[in-house]
Image: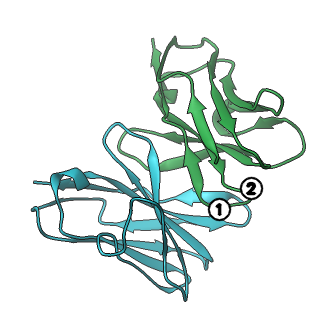
Amino acid sequence: AQSVTQLDSQVPVFEEAPVELRCNYSSSVSVYLFWYVQYPNQGLQLLLKYLSGSTLVKGINGFEAEFNKSQTSFHLRKPSVHISDTAEYFCAVSVSGGYNKLIFGAGTRLAVHP
Amino acid sequence: SAVISQKPSRDICQRGTSLTIQCQVDSQVTMMFWYRQQPGQSLTLIATANQGSEATYESGFVIDKFPISRPNLTFSTLTVSNLSPEDSSIYLCSVRDSLYGITFGSGTRLTVV
């Protein structure tokens, strides 16, 4: 069965610093991988997704993620964060590939400080 | 991507009553999903709803508690029945979009008192 582990429940960082949010997955089959962001009192917004091809995926708001099959990881990075990036970030895997039901990690709370 | 309108955005309900949540999509979609996000927790899939067939429920969720309707390709409802404080959560509708993956509505924040 697929599972997703987000290694950090909270990540504090200063404004304009780089950040990496870590995500590992387990699956016996090919997967599609996603990062979503949830701002306070809002729904989920897709940041980026990996389906196939290039392992470096660029998303919205300056975020990118790298798919590493050998390490079963899909870490999210941003070279310089802003106060407005403060939110909850969820890594997710699509069961059996494709745009089907998602299994989510526990989430990482990114807190950007001035 | 598909635009999802979810109603109500929030509600406070008495225990023992029911709440029906509506999800309207601006395009026809085959697959719709209902998720629950308990306070401070991640999202858990409740069920998958395909038009013209019975919803498929995940382990731990039953139709009597979470009946779902899917009358057409742009609309679905989730009812949370016989409410208890443990049902206080955010409920999110999502749809499968062939180009953009899975898109989420803004959620319904339910508080049971």
Q: Residue at label 2?
A: A97
Quadrant for residue A97, please give it: bottom right
Q: How crowded is mark 2: few (under 14 residues within 10 Å), some or many (20 or more)?
A: some
Q: Which residue is drawn at 46% across and 74% down?
A: B24
Q: Mark 1 lies on which chain?
A: A
Q: Distance between the residues labelled 1 and 2?
A: 7 Å
Which percent across, then down, holds residue A59? 71, 39
Q: What residue type is labelled 2?
A: Gly
Point out which mark residue A100 bears.
Answer: 1
Q: Residue at x 69, y 43 (%)?
A: A48
Q: Which of A14 and A98 is in front in this view?
A: A98
A88 vs B7: above or below: above
Q: Which shade of the palette goes to chain B?
A: cyan
> What residue sits 33% from the left and 46% below the top?
B38
Residue type indicated by callout 1: Asn
Residue at 36 percent of width and 74 percent of height:
B63
How many other residues sit within 10 Å of disc 1, few (<14), some (14-19) or many (≥20)? Answer: many
Which chain does the residue under circle 2 lie in? A
Instruction: Note whether B72 is above or below B16 in the view shown.
Output: below
The residue furthest right is A53
* Circle on res. B35: none
Q: Quadrant of the C terminus of chain B?
A: bottom left
Q: Are marks 1 and 2 in contact (CB under 8 Å)?
A: yes
Query: Any idea which chain is the green one in this picture?
Result: A
Quadrant where the N terminus of chain B sits is bottom right
Residue B109 placement: quadrant:
bottom left
Residue A69 vs B98, above or below: the answer is above
A29 vs A76, left or right, is right
